[in-house]
Structure formats: structure tokens, C-alpha cells
Amino acid sequence: MEVKVKNPWHRPVVIFLACVITAGIIIMVAISVVQYKPLHQKYKYGIVLDAGSSHTSVFIYEWPAEKENNTGMVRQKHTCNVQGKGISSYSDNPMGAGTSLKDCMEEAKQKIPAHRHHETPVYLGATAGMRLLKMENEEASEKVLDSVARSLKDLPFSYQGARIISGQEEGAFGWITVNYLSENLRKPTGTLGALDLGGASTQITFVPQQEIESHDNSIDFRLYGNDYHLYTHSFLCYGKDQALKLSMGKKIESTPKADETHPIELRDPCFHPGYNFTRTAQTVFNTPCMKKVKMANENFFHVGTGNWSQCRQSIRKIFNTSYCPYSRCSFNGVFQPSVSGNFGAFSAFFFVMDFLKLTNDSLDLTKQKLATYCSTPWKEIAETHPHINKKYLSEYCFSATYILTLLEDGYKFTSNNWNDISFIKKRKLTIVLDEADVVVQTTPKSLHQAEVIAVGAVADVSEYLHAIFQIPSIFGK
Ligand SMILES: O=P(O)(O)OP(=O)(O)OP(=O)(O)OC[C@H]1O[C@@H](n2cnc3c(O)ncnc32)[C@H](O)[C@@H]1O
Ligand SMILES: [Ca+2]
């Protein structure tokens, strides 16, 4: 007799299973469809504050959390300029330094999706203004750093640190940035030297053609698998604001007083004819870059005479070229190999030379044009540029003459290699930009796409940002 074995796969079960599987597929497809859109919005973020002597900028970086082909693109999503002066100006009111960051940090909270806040690293790097404050009043500089740290820790972001970076680090960052922007880091040959003119310090960094004779001026690191050995020096007090003080201070000290009752009249060839301003000596001597003088509370008349060659002579006096303990020096006894190769000059080098339209001429023509500009009456200058900040405007003759003197007499550029210098508009010192570059593996975008700051295989950018912010480690110290 034939026993009919009951088939476990009889129809109702098959239908049931088919339904379950179909439902499963539908649910999975639905989930991936729903996830598909957010996939493209899934970014991670990093925040860096560049606390310069003249002002603070907040940079927000963004990169995809999920990377196709292991390729991540870090871009500068947003920049916010903090209102008011740099954090070092808050020495008398340290709490104010932290408070000053509030508006920009509020903006950061808006720009970064709330669910990412807690994992977004925030770093603050302070430069020459804080170095000077530390020299002058270490306690005040600590209070200012404490204040900004407290203000950043109060935010929902992941606080990573607030510190004064060294001049060597600043020089190296500038060099990496310039070479990143000009796509040199992927090429085996030809890097650009970097010239950075800030308010309180200036940096020169390049690949030297000769041995570096002083340990302090040498910096080594690895990028894109290439080893770099750079010469770098940061001249504290030789940013354009401090250099103006040095130069005016020297002039005041050598200006005789007509009599005890009348203020000194400082006849200044670096300011336009017809320029006349009453200042207190305090505004010139309130810096650790100069010896304190007794006359700090006295007024003086600052009177422009608009004479380029005299201006240049007066600026030369702030460079000491009379001694050099090495085979060659720039100035103030600092070792410097002869400049070689092309250079990118940014920050105030660019702001000033770009404003004066002096970025494309020979050294000789630059001097001729500048001489004409300096001798132009202040009234005419002010009328021609009614919307330019009066302080900047009044100082362009000094600033450009200082730039030429620094480059020619200081760093020893000549009319033969003057055109090796390109004045370039660079985003402000961006530590993350430099740091992200360190891990970048594929071709960076062009200068025209400067907002795309790094392209490459980035395992976890935030981890790199953290590791590299502990700067000494990338430079093998
Ligand atoms: O590097 P440190 O020395 O700390 O200073 P900083 O970071 O604050 O300095 P910047 O490069 O931002 O600016 C350099 C100087 O240029 C000035 N500056 C900025 N914009 C300018 C413009 O459009 N024209 C002229 N000067 C300008 C600014 O006030 C500084 O004195
Ligand atoms: Ca700077």
C-alpha cells in the first residue's frame, strides 16, 4: 500500500515563507532607500580657531563620514571672523577673551548638525600675540588661555585643547598650506617656499640648498611618503604691526624735544604728506618688543612727510645686520641659507601688495611705483579710497616699504629673484587644513578650488586631527 508521505513544503507553508521573504526584502529595500538620502548628508566635522595677534578666525571643516572607495574629501565648510581684536588684547579682562568667541561658536552650533556635536573636535592655536603676552605677563597669558578653554569646554563639542603654537610649527604649517594649494606635495620635485607676514611675527620657510647650521631653524617631517627637511625661522616682533612700533619707537627716541612744554613732533617719511595725528607714546611702546621708556604718557604729533627712500632708511634701522655667528645670516644674528626656488608670500604680504597693485612688477618698478604712492598727499589717498579702513590706508606706504626692506635687506632677495615671489591669497592659517593634508593620498584639487582642502584616503580624519594637533609628534620631536 502506498503511504502518502506528507510533504512539509505543501502550498500554505510555501506561500507563508514566500510572504515572509518578500516582506523581508521589502523592509530591507525600504531601509536602504530611507538610508540612501541621509548617506549623502552624513558628514563629520572639525573646528579650528586660529587665534592670531590681530584677530581670531573660526574654521569649520567637513568630510564624509562614509567614504566610497576609501576616498574622503575634507572641505572648509564655513569661516567666522571673531568680532574685535585678537585674544591677546584681553590681558586686562581675560574673561572677555572667552566671551568674544561666543557668536562664532553659536554659528558653529547652527552649521553642524546637533547629532554630530559631541564628536566634533575643537582646537585653538594661538600665535605671536599670545607669545608676546606670555613674555610680558605669563599669568595674564594663562588666564586668557584658561578663559578661551573654558568657553570652548562649555560647548557641546569635543574640546581638544587651546595652546600657543611655536614659531617653527607656524612656519611649517604655512609651508604645507602653500604647497598644498599649489599641488606641489604630490610631485617629487619643486616645492614653494613660504613667506607669512602676520601682525606680530613673520615666518620664512623653504627647502634649503645648503646645510642648516643652527638646530632651531631645522624642521623635518614626512608627507605623502616624502621626507622633507626644511629651513624655517619665525621673527617675533617683525609682523607688520610690531615692526611699525619698532620703527616709530626708534624715530621717537632720536627726535629731539624742542622744549619741555611742547610735545615731540615725529616727522615720519613712511606716512603721506598732510597726514597728522596726535598719539600717546604708550601706543608705540606698549610692547615687550621694545625697552620701556619714561615718556609713555606723553603725547606726540605724528606728521607724515611721504618720502620713500627716507622711509626705507628708517626701516633698515630695525634690522641688525652687523653680526652673524654663522656662515651667513638674514638679520639679528639669525642663520639663513640663501633663498632658492619659488616662494609664495601670503597674509599681510598679500593684503598690502595686492591693495597697491604691486604683485606683478620687477623690483625696480615696484620701488618706483611705491615712491610715487608714498609721496601722494594723504587727502588725495583718503578721497580715492573712502571705504577702506583708515588705519590700514594710512599705513600702506609703511607696510609696503617694510615688506620690500624685509625681503631685500632681511631675507636677501634681489632684483634677479624678486619675481620668484608670488603674492598669494591664502586662507588664514588653517591647522586642520595642514593636518588633513598630512593624511591625504590622492591628487589635491587646484588652487581655484581652494575650499576643497584635502582629498584622499582618510581613515578617520578626526583621529588624525587629534594626533596631529599634538604637533611635536608629527615633527618627530
Ligand atoms: O600671525 P600673527 O602675527 O599672530 O597675526 P595675525 O594672524 O593676526 O595676522 P594676519 O595674517 O591675520 O594679518 C596680518 C596683518 O595684516 C593686517 N590686515 C588684515 N587685513 C588687511 C588688509 O586688508 N589690509 C591691510 N592690512 C590688513 C592685520 O591687521 C595684521 O596686522
Ligand atoms: Ca597668523
Image (tube, helix red, strand yellow):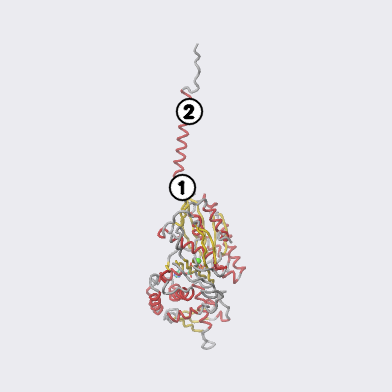
Q: Position of residue 137 (x, y in %)?
A: 60, 70
Q: Residue at x 40, y 80 (%)?
A: 375
The picture quadrant where one finds residue 271 is bottom left
**Amino acid type for the residue under numbered disc 1:** Asn
Of tags 2 and 1, the one toward the viewer is: 1
Disc 1 crowd, CA 10 A, few/some/many (<14, 14-19, 20+) = few
For residue 402, above or below residue 30: below
Q: Residue extending furthest bottom?
A: 259
For residue 158, above or below residue 394: above
For residue 321, above or below residue 163: below
Give the residue number, with chain letter if any, for mark 1.
69
User: Mark 1 falls on what kind of element?
Assistant: helix
Q: Residue extending furthest front?
A: 210
Q: Position of residue 238 (x, y in %)?
A: 51, 73
Q: Position of residue 70 (x, y in %)?
A: 48, 48
Instruction: Please state which of residues 172 and 39 is positioned toward the viewer in this rendering.
Output: 172
Disc 2 crowd, CA 10 A, few/some/many (<14, 14-19, 20+) = few
Could you tell me if residue 90 is visible in this image?
Answer: no
The numbered dot on residue 237 is none
Q: How many marks?
A: 2
Q: Residue extending furthest right?
A: 139
Could you tell me if residue 295 is visible in this image?
Answer: yes
**Amino acid type for the residue under numbered disc 2:** Leu
Q: Position of residue 56 (x, y in %)?
A: 51, 64
Give whichever of discs 2 and 1 has the lower sequence position: 2
Mark 1 lies within 8 Å of ligand 2 (Cβ measured): no
Give the residue number, with chain letter if any, for mark 2.
17
Q: Residue extending furthest top?
A: 1
Q: Give the spatial CA distance, label 2 vs label 1.
A: 37 Å
User: Mark 2 falls on what kind of element?
Assistant: helix
Instruction: Please state which of residues 332 and 312 is positioned toward the viewer in this rendering.
Output: 332
